[in-house]
């Protein structure tokens, strides 16, 4: 039986996301724009239009989405190699081809994965995709309320907080305002047991793409998020607190972990992994 998606969002969150029963098909979503950039089919016309607008502003947006997805695959394998068999993917979007549960369960069939997203449409799609998967689930929750995430019954059922966890923020923290982002990540990070890992990929403010950030932010204001902005490398590293950054450190997303192929010019996304 498919587990119902609990509405624990409490009506507090980004504009327009409080009511899971609302019709969001005419309002673009950051999760579904990302799906459209990857060539997925879990999106609406409004999302495809926004994705095209993003490509017009920033032609490398699709390349960055694909580089970010490739990073996701590499980092899941990295964590599996280090004995991490459960994952909490925050701001996950829609778990379509090449997402965490597919990668992890191909090697460890009972690897546990919980996807967390604020978008009720993304969660509904995810729940349908995962309905026959006993070890993976999606919940609607706002990462700015970490206790609601950690105490969610689905998280409690699937994730053992006494065993190593892969806590993942892949291409999503640049959508969260400063104070909320740091406080929430610190709270979630502090709940992890030793041997866990914090995974972050994030837009960085130091490339030729920076000049177009205002246009990108204006585009995303029409979606479920309030802004889209890069941070400096030092600001991104601050999310890790006292976690030990594993080699090669904070690098371009396509270069992690071993300096992959590709031109970094205009890439605008960096990634790092920290061991708790």
Image (cartoon, helix red, strand yellow):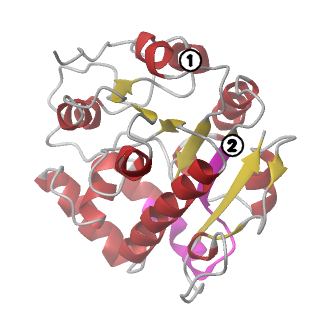
251 on left or right of 154: right
Q: Quadrant of the N terminus?
A: top left
Residue 243 higher or lower than 260, as above or below: above
At horizontal 47% and vertical 41% (from top left) the residue drawn is: 226
Q: Residues within 10 Å of mark 2 (few under 14, many from 20)?
A: many
> What's the magenta region?
198-216
In this picture, residue 39 sits left or right of residue 93: left
Q: Position of residue 2 (x, y in %)?
A: 18, 19
Q: Kindly identify the residue that appears in the image at 87 percent across and 41 percent down.
A: 242
Quadrant of the frame with the C terminus = top right
- Residue 268 placement: quadrant: bottom right
Q: What kind of element bears circle 2?
A: strand
Pointer 1: residues within 10 angstroms few (<14), some, or many (20+)?
A: some
Foreground residue, 6 or 274?
274
Q: Earlier in the sequence, mark 1 or mark 2?
A: 1
Nearer mark to the viewer, of 1 and 2: 2
Indicate whether 195 appears above or below 147: below
Q: Position of residue 82 (x, y in %)?
A: 66, 49
Which residue is denoted by mark 1 in the rendering? 150
Task: Using the image as rendered, state which of residue 53 and residue 171 is in the foreground.
Answer: 171
Residue at figure coordinates x 71%, y 36% from the top left: 182
Displayed quadrant of residue 246: bottom right
Q: Position of residue 178 (x, y in %)?
A: 68, 40
Q: Picture coordinates of residue 33 (x, y %)?
A: 29, 55
- Above or below, comparing residue 270 to residue 45 in the picture: below
Residue 197: which disc?
2
Check residue 200 for magenta coloring: yes
């Amino acid at each position: 039986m498919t587990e119902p998606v609990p509405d624990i969002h409490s009506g507090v969150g980004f504009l327009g996301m409080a009511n899971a029963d609302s019709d969001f098909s005419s309002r673009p979503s950051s999760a579904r724009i990302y799906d459209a950039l990857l060539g997925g089919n879990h999106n609406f016309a409004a999302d495809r239009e926004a994705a095209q607008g993003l490509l017009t502003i920033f032609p490398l947006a699709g390349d960055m989405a694909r580089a970010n997805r490739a990073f996701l695959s590499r980092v899941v394998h990295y964590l599996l190699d280090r004995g991490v068999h459960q994952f909490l993917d925050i701001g996950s979007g829609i778990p379509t081809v090449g997402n965490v549960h597919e990668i992890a369960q191909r090697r460890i069939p009972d690897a546990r994965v919980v996807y967390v997203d604020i978008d009720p449409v993304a969660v509904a799609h995810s729940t349908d995709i995962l309905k026959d998967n006993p070890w993976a689930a999606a919940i609607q929750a706002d990462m700015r309320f970490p206790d609601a995430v950690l105490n969610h019954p689905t998280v409690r059922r699937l994730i053992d907080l006494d065993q190593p966890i892969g806590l993942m923020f892949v291409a999503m923290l640049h959508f969260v305002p400063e104070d909320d982002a740091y406080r929430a990540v610190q709270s979630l990070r502090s709940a992890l047991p030793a041997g866990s890992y914090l995974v972050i990929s994030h837009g960085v403010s130091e490339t030729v793409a920076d000049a177009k950030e205002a246009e990108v932010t204006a585009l995303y204001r029409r979606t479920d998020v309030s802004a889209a902005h890069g941070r400096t490398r030092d600001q991104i590293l601050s999310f890790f607190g006292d976690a030990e950054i594993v080699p090669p450190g904070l690098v371009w997303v396509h270069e992690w972990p071993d300096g992959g192929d590709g031109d970094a010019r205009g890439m605008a996304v960096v990634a790092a992994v920290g061991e708790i």
